[in-house]
Amino acid sequence: MNDSMTVLKNKVVQIIEAVTATDQSDLGDDDEIIQLDSMKTIVLIVQLEEQFGITVEEGDMLFENFSSIHKICAIIHKASDKA
Amino acid sequence: MWRQAEQLINNEARTVLLLCKVQPSEDEIKEAHLLLGNPAFHYLQFFAYLMEHKVTMIVYRNLLAHSLHRHIPPKYMHMMDMFASGMEERNRILDMHLAPLFGLIRDRGIEAVLLKGAMLRHSVYPTSGLRFSNDTDLLVQEKELQPIGKLLEEQGFIQGFYSYKTGVEPASRQEVITKRLVTHEVVPFLKEVHHPMCKVVQVDINFDIFNRAKRMRTNFDTAALFDSTIPSSSALSSLRHEFNILQLSSHLYQDATMVQGIRAHKDMELIKFVDIYEYIRKFGESIDWDWLRAEIVQAGLQPVVFYSLYYMEYLMGSIVPESFMNSIAPDDRAYLDYYGVEEEKPIQWNRTFLERVFDSKRKLELLGLDKGELGESSKYFSIF
């Protein structure tokens, strides 16, 4: 994993921890983030948009796209490319 | 039929039920004459029901067409006349702004379909002023959300909410995301046009005909709606008749049974029952009921459609083929008296359906509940 990917992942984990108020240090990239209910997912998306300066596309606005670190990073990359 | 329980409602409510369809029967008109001619008739109560149920214009038309207006004191007729004329003007202004917009949507190759009032106003009701429209609903596929949003913004629309005091207020990003994720539509697009009868044009973009709240999601293939659309009187198409029945039923069911609809006073509006009745009255002979039954059964939508058609016939009279109703009737009909269908455990109403229709305080039943009973819907109370 390159440095920028690690930085991105660490920042995503920090945001998830803040939104869920739980320790996520053992969370694997493809593990489902079980503490994320619908309302917390919405708060997570708002936080991701604000902190990464992106706008999630309408077509990507699905709960399942925010259920793991891997999927979240993919959405951030996609939105950053369009920005 | 409501007649079997008519002692539960007052004469004013009965008169509304008799006159809220486009073509009341001779017996219904005769009975309305008797009720309206009663010296104890409570005109203000009657008007309150008409407003609450959005049927003022239809009833006003019937009052004039059948000389029932002679029972009503002039000052009340004047109020109704102003309201009906205002609505006619409002719809004229709306059409004036919407016609070029619909043309632009079509020219840009965006497939958008008219729903609800925007479709009914011109195709079902004899004059466009009869159907009140607060907003204009369009259905698009999810892939078209971005292009149509962009086009609306180019035309001066803002995604947000209308304040009577301050005008259009843009939605927060959280409101936009929440509406997109947990419902079947996005935050409305609004444009102020500053006409006394139509201060703002509101376009609601739907991307499904079923709500996507928890426990409300269905297996219905939304893309199929676009396979066989039919022309309308505008630049945009309409759903085929069977899908319009499905959409109107889904809309009625959702507003009548979800906490969100009840809190917003959108449940039990007579106009939603009238819309389905009048749609079937107008297009009944073209509706392929067997085809519709197959679609409903395949997606497991029997409870949704039965709920809406059952209560529509209860209020308006029989109009759906009996064999169709029997074929979609659930074995257990107890759910007809429940609300909070998005919750883990739906809640039974304390009062009968007919009593609820004419009791604008029905939502007070929600106040007696534990917060836990509204666990799902209460998450969004601050947003919707």
Image (cartoon, coloured by chain):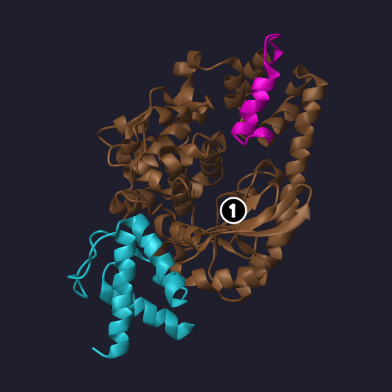
Chain colours: A cyan, B brown
Residue drawn 77% across the image and 55% down it = B194
Residue drawn 66% across the image and 49% down it = B163
Q: Is residue B49 magenta?
A: yes
Seen from the viewer's position, the closer of residues B317 and A14 is: A14
Is residue B221 in view?
Answer: no
Tell me if A4 is positioned left or right of B367 in this view.
left
Estimate the x, y position of residue B161 in percent, counting from the top left.
60, 54
Please say if B268 is above or below B280: above
Residue drawn 75% across the image and 54% down it = B93
Seen from the viewer's position, the closer of residues B222 and B231 is: B222
Estimate the x, y position of residue B289 in percent, counting from the top left.
40, 47
Tell me if B258 is positioned left or right of B361 in this view.
left
Mark 1, Cα crowd under 10 Å, few <14 / some 14-19 / many 20+, is: many
Q: Quadrant of the N terminus of chain B?
A: top left
Please say if A7 is above or below B381: below
Is residue A71 in view?
Answer: yes
Q: Quadrant of residue B42?
A: top right
Q: Quadrant of residue B350?
A: top left
Would you name the residue on which mark 1 appears?
B119
Estimate the x, y position of residue B98 in percent, counting from the top left.
68, 61
Tell me the element at label 1.
Answer: helix
Q: Main secondary structure of the magenta part?
A: helix
Please say if A2 is above or below B256: below
Seen from the viewer's position, the closer of residues B292 and B353 is: B353
Instruction: Tell me which chain the residue with mark 1 is part of.
Output: B
Tell me if B232 is positioned left or right of B316 in this view.
right
In this picture, which residue range is highlighted in magenta? B36-56
| View extreme (bottom): residue | A2
The amino acid at mark 1 is Met
Q: Is residue B51 magenta?
A: yes
